[in-house]
Amino acid sequence: MTPCLAHHVFFALLSQCFLVWSTSAAPSGSGSANHMLVGVAVSANLLNSDQQYENIVKKNFALITAGNEMKWGPLEKAYGQIDFQEADQIYEYIKKNNKLLRIHTLFAQSQNPEWVKNLESQQVKSAMVNILDKVIQRYSERAIAIDVCNEILEDSGTLRNTVWVQKLTQTYVEFVYTTARQLATKYNKNLQLYLNDYGIEGIGPKSDAMLKLATDLNKKGILDAVGFQGHFIVGQVPKDLQTNLERFTNAGLKVAITELDVRIENIAQGITPEKQAQKANDYKFVFETCQKVGCVSVTVWGVTPKDSWVGKYGFFPGAGEALLFDSNYQPTPAMKELSQDLFQG
């Protein structure tokens, strides 16, 4: 059998395994038959209003992350009044189309409810337990992972001075992961608990600190995995990505790329074929590295420039074209460079 034919047969069998698994077994958190899942962050509004957008998601991606709709701030804008409407829209889409879910995210450095700042410490704890319970209970049937905490480390590696530290001290991390483990055991014992952050993809002070924190939590039985966001500039993906990821897997942790995009800077000056080629190489490098390491999943942070955060809201001014599909819903050179066998929607 030629290498090309063997490759084709392997992924054909993988696809069939995924179909059987996804319809007959509970999510395991380790992908399909222990192979890497490919996912995307979506917008409830675009899923409901843009047919071309929805077609791309349905055809290409097995794993879905709500870009904003499952964060605590949007869910509970008023104390005690949880609004699941938009999050439910995404979850109904997931169930209807036989997708899987990454729950993102409850305790982060931003997009938290404003009213939390006005609560006493015990009230904060009760509110945290309540939102964890409601979200895990509601969505865990199709969920393989939850980013319990997000972006809690400074670049130096110290714990970020978030509202959670201010209200509960640094012990909040162990508290919320202990609570999340109890709830996952209650509602879906296969739900994997993640700690998610950016700037930890290469070896450095922040990834060193993440490795120590994650290993400590894992040894206590309350953390399963680390999410590496993966917001990169074209040509600047860390060369030691594989070595770094293997530090975590060697420590007994699962790993995933959770928010991948590769942005081209100064797009107003034009996007040259050379930049597109470099972007394609960068995407290919990340995907191939994850396959070598055994990542649970790779999630791309958006579908087209319409729903990308790059170049918007004050983030990365002048940058753009960071995703796998362009504004006309066509695959970019980066998408064409990747093995289409990976994209089993």
Image: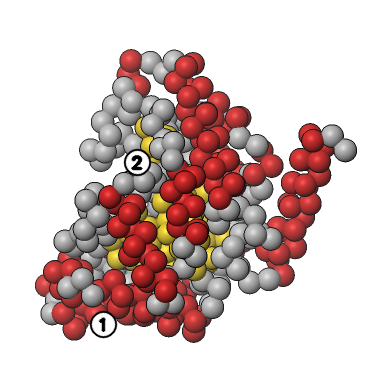
**Residue drawn where x is 68% and y is 71% of the image:** 25
Can residue 65 be seen by looking at this rendering?
no
Q: Which mark is residue 126?
A: 1
Quadrant of the frame with the N terminus: top right
Distance Cα–Cα, label 2 vs label 1: 32 Å
CA neighbours of label 2 inside 10 A, class few (<14), some (14 to 19), many (20+): some
Label disc, if present, on residue 309 of the rendered structure: 2
Q: Secondary structure at mark 1?
A: helix
Q: Quadrant of residue 66?
A: bottom left
Say which quarter of the image contains residue 75.
Answer: bottom left
Residue at the spot x=49%, y=52% of the render? 246
Within 10 Å of the Cα at label 1, are there few (<14), some (14-19), or many (20+) other Cα atoms? few
Vertical comparison of 26 with 22: above or below: below
Q: Residue furthest right?
A: 1
Front residue of 298 and 85 = 298
Q: Position of residue 297 (x, y in %)?
A: 54, 53
The residue drawn where x is 55% and y is 57% is 296
- Residue 238 drawn above or below residue 159: above
Amino acid type, mark 2: Trp
Instruction: Compare residues 10 and 58 and report the one nearer the observer.
Output: 10
Q: Residue at x 18, y 62 (%)?
A: 162
Coordinates of residue 200 in the picture (x, y in percent): 35, 49
Viewer-closest of 126 and 274: 274
